[in-house]
Image (tube, rainbow, N blue to C red):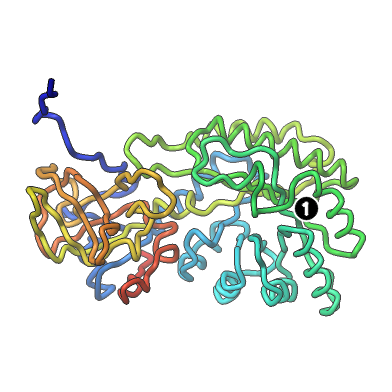
Amino acid sequence: MTREKRSDRPTNKPLGPIPAGFSGIDGELAIGGRKASELVEEAGRTPLFVYSRDLLDARVAQLRAALPERLAIHYAVKANPWRPVIEHMAGLVDGFDIASGGELAMVRTAGIDPALVSFAGPGKRDEELEAAIAAGVTLNCESEGEAARALAIAERLGTAPRMAIRVNPSFELRGSGMKMGGGAKPFGIDQDRVPALAKHLIAAGADWRGLHIFTGSQALDADAIIETQGNVLNLADQLAEEIGTPLPKLNMGGGLGIPYFAGDEPLDLVKVGAALAARFENLPENLADTALCIELGRYLVGEAGVYLTRIVDRKTSHGETYLVTDGGLHHQLAASGNFGTVVRRNYPVAIASHFGAEPTEEVNVVGCLCTPLDRLADKALLPHANVGDLVAVFCAGAYGASASPAAFLGQGPAAELLV
């Protein structure tokens, strides 16, 4: 017996939700109060990343309003290391977190005070350690071996290095997109070995800067984040007790996610902030005077960015319509589904040239690369678009330009604007 094919069953795949704060002018997507076509004209070409100052400002303002005043906000530079973005964030946040010597050079070029910078990441080279120690950056040590190398370099330089320990906790952040704690990990030092190393660093004359406990990223579940932040504070208290000295600073990590896909709901930030405020009212003695901070990357900049790419061809194959653009995975690896996702889902995508128009057709939006992996939207319901129209991929402010293979097939980087 054969099953009848249902021709009325929808075949389209839903698009992710367009972030709040975007509107249209004369039927065209506007970013920072300017039409997409005007921004492309200013940049002189597509593809183009556009980042909105207003949305960056608004996101930090939301955090300040929701989170306890005592909690400092650090920007994780890896999310978007473009210099104008770093310079703009310098007027909004309290500190910066880097993950390489290259990012150290970037923040220094942008005029950031090294005293406001912490340096995490496994595999730090000796030259990176030396540059950070000489500049006065806080090192978040990822192993006993790294700590030994850092102490030896500092002795040669004749300085007391600023040193913290990145902890690999026994717990993880439930529902996080990337788990950075719990079990065997290349990140940090297993929590049971932290007290001995901390005592060694203090005895060796290091400027002891406390702990960095980062458990995961891209979580949308407020309850999971609240649970993890509570576990982080409990562990920090326990480790401070075992070290035998109050904790000078605690980087509580980040983990706050943004909606990328259909069905994703925005994080309840107010709920997270209220729970933290309640915890901060009853901190143990070991944390009473601890400088507390949270480390955020994509949550600060992700929704403030848009990737604009122009349609260069419109074609049909076996009854399916393809909009071929001059962009693709070489700038938007994550949107193509090739940056850690198991099942490809559509990012928020719109026809920028006809923003707000009713969808009239099912299309596939693809890039210009000679690979079937180069997809920006599959079977998406969108307004009719022709050659020359602009396509917008949202949530492009984080892990876009710097996390994608721009050199693939000789395509080169996209242009970037901060408006």
Residue 65, percent from left and from top: 54, 41
Q: Residue at x 14, y 30 (%)?
A: 9
Q: Is residue 252 above or below residue 208?
A: above
Q: Is 343 placed left or right of 149 in the picture? A: left
Residue 214, percent from left and from top: 64, 48
Residue nearest the viewer, comparing 220 with 86: 220
Q: Residue at x 73, y 75 (%)?
A: 130
Tally the marks: 1
Quadrant of residue 64 within the rendered picture? top right
Q: Quadrant of the N terminus?
A: top left
Quadrant of residue 160 within the rendered picture? bottom right
Q: Residue at x 19, y 39 (%)?
A: 12
Q: Is residue 151 above or below residue 290?
A: below
Q: Mark 1 highlights which residue?
A: 210
Under mark 1, the amino acid is Gly
Q: Quadrant of the C terminus?
A: bottom left
Residue nearest the viewer, comparing 92 with 160: 160
Q: Secondary structure at mark 1?
A: strand
Q: Is 351 placed left or right of 254 in the picture? A: left
Residue 30, percent from left and from top: 25, 56
Residue 143, percent from left and from top: 74, 58
Outermost residue on the front side: it is: 1
Residue nearest the viewer, comparing 285 with 387: 387
Outermost residue on the top side: it is: 1
Q: Residue at x 89, y 58 (%)?
A: 200
**Structural crowding at the residue carrying mark 1, measured as other residues with C-alpha within 10 Å and reported as few (<14), some (14–19) or many (≥20):** many
Q: Is residue 326 above or below residue 169?
A: below
